[in-house]
């Protein structure tokens, strides 16, 4: 692929995600900066990335989408591919805590499902979609579009100091989830995602990073 390598950072408009986007920009990557609702913060992160970019070929583009929504995940990847022509790195950073913190006896199923959709279901199936992009077309098994790298950043404690150290704007409050704290893609572990259909054999790697 011509130009700079491309990274897609979910939840990249603020906090840890913004810090990751800035670090990737400084390392020479173009970055698709995903945001759910704060377009202004995403634009500010994109502008800050441009200031840190060492290569004029690098580009930075905010892309709206809620990783908890299947149609948004599809649109997010499609928009990234349309804008950059490919993606080498997917950073699963987006994550939320319950809107109202409660113990087990008071937690609602609605709250549980909301956190589950964002912190587990969304990253799992977005990774599936990106991994499918990396795998070769069925008609050309000897070729591949290119392997990739998929870090999984767990929501919760330790994120704000790292985000501030990396220059991220608007660091979000830290702390655990109290109701439930999911390890990102805990079921099966992230590396297993890329073993399906030989993904690991095509140069794709998945890791879990726990900043703190």
Image (spheres, helix red, strand yellow):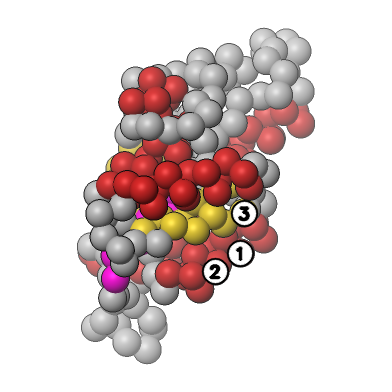
- State the image quarter where residue 71 is shown: bottom right
Which residue is denoted by mark 3 in the rendering? 64
What is the crowding at mark 2: few (fewer than 14 residues within 10 Å), some, or many (at least 20)? few
- Which numbered disc, 1 or 3, marks the residue that appears first in the sequence? 3
Secondary structure under badge 1? helix
Q: Which mark is residue 75?
A: 1
200 drawn magenta: no
State the CA–CA distance, disc 2 to disc 1: 5 Å
- Judging depth in this view, the residue of 138 and 211 nearest the camera is 211
State the CA–CA distance, disc 3 to disc 2: 12 Å
What is the crowding at mark 1: few (fewer than 14 residues within 10 Å), some, or many (at least 20)? some
Residue located at (29% from left, 71% from top): 3
- Judging depth in this view, the residue of 58 and 134 nearest the camera is 58
- Which numbered disc, 3 or 2, marks the residue that appears first in the sequence? 3
Q: Which mark is residue 78?
A: 2
Q: Give the x, y percent position of residue 101.
A: 68, 15
The answer to whether the residue labelled 2 contacts the one labelled 1, judged by CB atoms less than 8 Å apart, is yes
Residue interval drawn in magenta? 3-9
């Amino acid at each position: 692929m011509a130009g700079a390598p491309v990274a897609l950072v979910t939840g990249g408009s603020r906090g840890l995600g913004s810090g990751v986007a800035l670090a990737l920009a400084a390392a020479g990557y173009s970055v698709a900066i995903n945001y759910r609702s704060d377009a202004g913060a995403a634009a500010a992160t994109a502008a800050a990335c441009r200031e840190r970019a060492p290569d004029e070929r690098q580009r930075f583009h905010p892309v709206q989408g809620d990783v908890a929504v299947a149609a948004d995940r599809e649109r997010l990847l499609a928009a990234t591919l349309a804008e950059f022509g490919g993606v080498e790195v997917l950073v699963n950073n987006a994550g939320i805590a319950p809107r109202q913190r409660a113990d087990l006896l008071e937690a609602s199923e609605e709250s549980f499902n909301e956190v589950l959709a964002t912190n587990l279901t969304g990253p799992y199936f977005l990774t599936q979609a990106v991994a499918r992009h990396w795998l070769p077309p069925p008609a050309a098994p000897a070729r591949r579009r290119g392997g990739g790298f998929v870090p999984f950043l767990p929501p919760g404690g330790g994120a704000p100091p790292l985000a501030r150290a990396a220059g991220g704007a608007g660091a979000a409050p830290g702390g655990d989830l109290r109701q439930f704290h999911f390890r990102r893609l805990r079921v099966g572990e992230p590396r297993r995602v890329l073993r399906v259909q030989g993904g690991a054999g095509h140069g794709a790697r998945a890791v879990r990073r726990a900043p703190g």
